[in-house]
Image (cartoon, rainbow, N blue to C red):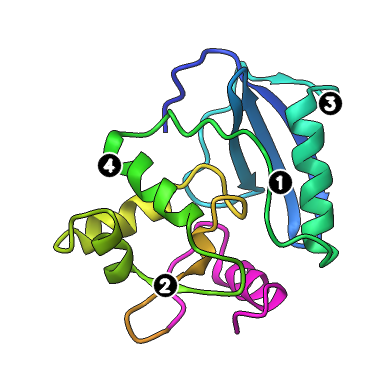
Amino acid sequence: MKFKTPLLRTLHVDTALGGVTLAATDDGLAGLWFDRQRHLPDMRGWQPDDAHPVLREAAAQLQDYFAGTRSDFDLPLDLSHGTAFQQAVWQALLAIPAGQTTSYGTLSQRVGNPAAVRAVGAAVGRNPISVIVPCHRVLGADGSLTGYAGGLERKTALLALEGAR
């Protein structure tokens, strides 16, 4: 994924499911990637910034989430780094409440393109803000666990943490 902003601020934090890199622009949180997950962006030139207010707040909210004391996130998000279709899918992911799941087919209907199930799946897989934009809440049509860029073990753990499985 190409980020239009040449300089993103980053913070690496440890979580219950492994290390994550957070990234922010001036507009909000733009990324959350688990170490060694699929679809990692090229982070060369990004600036580490452990004092950035959005990154610090995201790290604190993540710790609360993994401790079981938070189910929703309250952060400014910058989802502008995808196509219009990807952005629509990522916005639809934000509407899935904690503890609930949906299917790729239902998600494609929500974005107004019921025939685009595979394209929706691809957009879900390229979600740049894992956990906070809850792509882990999307399952196969039969309720089965399907791909997750951070790994199916993490997807299973996230759904268990939220009481969805």
Question: Which of the pair 44/120 is nearer the observer?
Answer: 120
In front: label 3 or label 4: 4
Tell me the number on the disc at residue 102: 2
Quadrant of the image for the C terminus? Answer: bottom right
The image quarter containing residue 154 is: bottom right
Q: How far apart are marks 3 and 4 (CA)?
A: 32 Å
Residue at figure coordinates x 51%, y 34% from the top left: 41
The residue most toward the left is 115
* Residue under label 4: 85
Disc 2 + disc 1, Cβ < 8 Å:
no
Does the stretch in magenta take in 39? no
Give the residues in magenta.
144-165
Which residue is tagged 3? 50
Which three-letter amino acid code belongs to the residue tagged 4? Answer: Phe
Tell whether 24 sits left or right of 5. right
* Residue count near mark 4 (Cα–Cα under 10 Å), binned few <14, some 14–19, many ≥20: some
The three-letter code of the residue at mark 2 reads Thr
Q: Is disc 1 placed on a helix, strand or loop?
A: strand
Amino acid residing under circle 3: Asp
What amino acid is found at the position of numbered circle 1 in the picture? Val
CB within 8 Å, label 1 to label 4: no
Looking at the image, tell me whether mark 1 or mark 4 is earlier in sequence order.
Answer: 1
Residue 108 in picture, x, y percent from top left: 26, 61
- Compare residues 1 and 134 and report the one nearer the observer: 134
Residue underneath mark 1: 20
Q: Earlier in the sequence, mark 3 or mark 4?
A: 3
Q: Quick check: marks 2 and 4 in contact, CB under 8 Å?
A: no
Task: Give percent across and percent down for residue 133.
Answer: 54, 51
Height in image: 148 above or below 13? below
Vertical relation: 149 (above or below) 138: above
Q: Answer whether residue 160 is magenta in the image.
A: yes
